[in-house]
Each structure stands twice: as structure tokens, then as C-alpha cells.
Image (cartoon, rainbow, N blue to C red):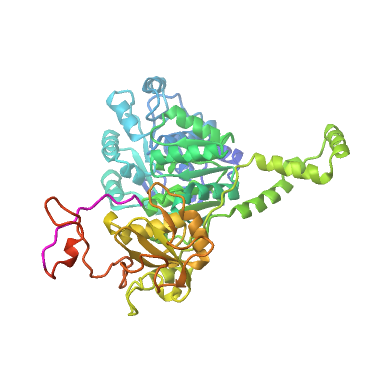
Amino acid sequence: MPFRTSITPLVRALSERGYEEPTPVQDAVLEEGTAMRDLLVSAQTGSGKTIAYGLAIAGTLLGEEERFSEAGAPMALIVAPTRELAIQVTTELTWLYAHAGAEIVTCVGGMDPRAERRKLDRGAHIVVGTPGRLRDHLERNALKIGALQALVLDEADEMLNLGFREDLEFLLEATPSERRTLLFSATLPKTIMAMAKRYQRNAMRIEVAKGTTGHVDIEYRAIRMAPNEVEHAIVNVLREAESPSAIVFCNTRESVRHLSSGLLERGFSVVTLSGELGQAERNQAMQALRDGRARVCVATDVAARGLDLPSLNLVIHAELPSDAETLQHRSGRTGRAGRKGVSALLVPISRRRKAERLLAEANISAVWSGAPSAETIRRLDEERLLSDPLLTEPASEEDLAAAKRLLETRSPEDLAAALARIYRSRLPAPEDVFDPGFGPDLKVAKEREFAGRERKGGEPGERGAGREQARGGPVVWFHMDVGRRNNADPKWILPLICRRGKITRAEIGAIKIYDRETKFEIAESVAKKFASAAEVSDGDDITISFADGAGGDAPPRGKFGGGKPGGPGGKGGKPFAGGKPGFDGPRAKKPFQRKGGRPDGAAASAPSGAPRDKPRKPRRPQD
């Protein structure tokens, strides 16, 4: 279906850009009955909204003419939430209105306001800007709005989320009441509906994308990982995809700085985008992505709106977004205008439920898996080498002569091996990663984690999580140099064991806390891997080793969930009882000695019901 607009300069511009058929939102705003009316449009990000409202206001601005008259006071004002989106809108409208002779001025924070005022003084047909900067120009009388015919609010929901409500209402109150108002938003919350009712006149509502349905052109992946392997997982996801450009989203500026430094050290070409950068630095980062000098952008959510890179095929959520809407806007940087893309969420063990909730709220079905393995990436590298232009392009006479000389001194195998080394040397090395093995698609792992939450009888000493599936299997006992005197508590011990050893709760058996130490069971199938990983401290200053009396080759063994730990010390500690992991039974804790009181441990022999001193709570290790 061709575009419905009859304005020749715009039709010509669309044809030159290869636009043959309109997207659903572009077609909807040009239907009969929409001309000259206020519009309230809900459409998914990446659906072509910029071109949609560019076409929608063309008739209002040009009328029966094909070219604009001399520029003076602006005829249209387009408001966007971020600098990047405003600049992107200017870029799109510049080529769309090129043959109509439109003068377009951009006014955004971070740029020189004096230069913007000079451009406004020279005249403009369309002004694009962010709410704060536009209000500033209005208050300083640099922006004349007496001739304004159309006002467009792009990504209105995001502008409200970013705290621009007061600025928006100022603009809506200040602009002529007879203007045409077009409000575009990915979602239509109550605040947007209230604003539309107040400031629009009999607006036609157009809803192209229902609710929060995810993009059909985006493949969502949920990547299981150990909490201390975030960078390793990102490296392998980037290496597997080998996307011409990718965005990695973090929640804070500090995370952006830390992750970008790590990726640069590994050999990736990286730029950053965050609120602490000036506009010039942001523009340089965007240009580096567009011309291929950089392939990875590490960004906060400031880049989740308005960023449109044709080569962007991969979005990675290094940290889970705060809500489903942010998830969709981040992911919407890829899969745009019919192109395919991948959105990968990195999900550590402790964040699984949040990831499931986000996906459910966004009505997204994700494929769960572990991070790509180093072996998989090496295999892909071999396949990519075979299709590399170095091998596929025709050889010149000079190349053939050099090859002949090389073959006289080296075997074909030596030369092929050297070529493989050179190819690998220019690529970041893949990382060895651990798959914790959880997720909705792994029913067994899920059942293990939730099994035993409610105690179903059994002998004292059977800890809750994972008991039903694992009971009876071989185990290895390990030792940790913290106990009750260090305020040992399963609330932080259990996650610490999982994190240090890169295992799941289903592979942990009984845990016994003593005064000065803690002993716990690990399934024998993962014991060696656990011992190797757990011996490296990640800042908690806790030593984990095989239990007393055993070395790495002959650790004490028993049945998973039962038996006494090997070595001395098996008598003074009680295993966890009941359904909750880490509940240490009804035995009273020994108080710490207080000034003028009984020595430590005296309260242990006090008669039942006797008052006890309240122990001080020492600082627990960081988990």
C-alpha cells in the first residue's frame, strides 16, 4: 500500500530513501478523517513514529503549497524527552522535508544556547527540542510561538517519567490554543490520558500496539549466570553475536564506567553514554557507532529512547531494568523498522524471580539458556574465518607471488595455523563461564529449589531446600571459618556458598553451624569444581576448604542430607532442622560477654526461662 500523502516533495523524499510501504502507525495517521485533527497515538517504539508525525503535520504546515515560504517564527514545535531523540528527530525530518525547503532548528540541553538563539533569530519552520531548553528560550523571548500551527509531544510517557510535567504544562499553556496537538506515546497511562483531555480538542485516539506486547522482530533471551561472572557473560554474548553494533545497558553511571573499562581491556571498541557526558561527547560516541569505529555502547537508560542505529542487532541488559516498560524501551533499540534483533537479559541466581516477573508483565516469552561457552565461540570463529574476506576475495598477482614464496619455506599446515592465530589475535578472547542451571524451562532445577520449603517429616538434620530430589546421593563435606560467634546466619551463608562456588542451592545439602566454624555438604558430582572456585575469595575474607581430616583427593563422604561431617568437631553442632534452610533449631544462642557479666557461654547452662543478655551483632561478611 503506497503512502496516502499527496504532497509531492515528501513522496519524492520517501522514494529516494527506499520507503515503499508505510508502517501501521504511518498508515493510521494518514487515514481519512485525521487531517487537521488532534491525535492521541499509542505505538510501539521503533515503529516509525517520527516519520508518522512528520507526514501528519505536513498538510497543516504546507497546505496546498509544495515548498515553505521564507523562514520566520516557527510553524511547528516538536518536544522530545532526551537530547539523543531530539537530534534523531531533526535528522529524520531534515531529509523528509528536504525538497520542501524546511528550516529546522534543534534546541537541547548541553548545547550552546547563544548559538541556538542566533539560529532562531534567523528564522525556522520547525523547532525540535527538549522541554527544559524550549521553556528557557520561551521565557527569554528567544522562541516566538505566535505563528505556531502544530505541537507534537514525542514519547510523552517518558517525559512525564523524567520529571518534565511542569515544563510540558508550561509549553502547552503558552502555545496558541488554536494549534493542532499530536501526542505520541508508547503507553497511555492515566497521566497521559488526563493531559490529553485537558490540552487536546476532541482528539482522535489511534492505538497501533496493544498494551505492552513485545516486538515480533526481537528475539528475547534470558541468560543464566553466576553473580560474579557478569563481565564474562557479556564478553561471550558479544563474541557469539559479532553484531556490527551493540548496546549494553547498566543501571548506574558507576556501572557504565566499570564495565566499559573491562571491555576496553579485553579488546572491544567501546563508547559510553550516560547523563554525566556533555552533548559534544554524546555526539562523538553516536558518530563512532554509526561509522563503525566503535561496536559496543555501554549506556544507562538515557540511551533507551530515540537511539536508532541501522546496524544495531544486539541489546544486552547487564543489569535488569526496573520495570517492564524500561525493558521494552531498552530492547526497542534493536528490531526496528522490520529488522531483526536480539535482546539478552543477564539473570544471576538471586534475580531470577524479578526477570520472570518483568517478562510476564511485558508479555514476552524468552528463551532461557546459559551464556555461550568458550568452546562454542571458538567453533564459530573457525566458521567465520572460512567466510572472511581475506579468504573469499580474489588474490592479486602480488598476493600470489608472496604466497608462492611462503610455500617454498613453510608447509600449508604451518601457514594455515599462522592465519588462524592472526585471525584470533584480533578478537577478544572468550571466557570460561558457568551455567547455574535454573530457569522456567528447567523444571527439574526449579523443583529442586522449591522442594522441601514445607517440611514433610524426616529425621532431624535434613535441611529444606533440595532435599527431596537429592537425598541419598554422595556428598563431600566442606568447612568455613565462621560460626555463631561471627553471627553466622543461613540468610547470607547460603548465597555466599552459591556465589563463591558457582553452584545452585539444589547442590547444597546439610549445613551445621558451630561456635567458631560452619560445615556443609556439597554434592560429590560438583565437589571438585566447587573447591576450585570457592578457594578464591571475592572480598568476604572467609576461607572455604575441605572439612578437617581430608584432602582434595580423599574428601569425607556420606549420604546427601545425612551423616556426620568428617574430622573432629562433629559433636557440638546441630544440623538445620525444619523446612527453612538455616534454622538452627530451638537451642538458645550463647551471648557475648558483657562488662561485669558472666563469661561467654555461661548462659548456656541457665535454667529455662531465665533472662539472657542480648548478644551484640558483629558486622557480617559482605555477601
Residue 494, how many percent across, how many down? 37, 60
State the image quarter where residue 602 is shown.
bottom left
**Predominant SS of the magenta segment:** loop
Up the image or down, 220 lies above or below 255; here it is below
Can I make out residue 283 in this image?
yes
User: Magenta segment, which residues?
Assistant: 610-623
**What residue is drawn where x is 84% and y is 43%?**
411
Residue 618, how many percent across, how many down? 25, 51
Say whether residue 621 is magenta: yes
Given residues 44 and 398, the one toward you in this image is 398
Given residues 98 and 397, the one toward you in this image is 397
**What residue is drawn where x is 48% and y is 38%?**
260
Given residues 441 and 69, the one toward you in this image is 441
Residue located farthest toward the bottom when viewing the structure as drawn: 457
State the image quarter where residue 429 is shown.
top right
Say whether residue 163 is magenta: no
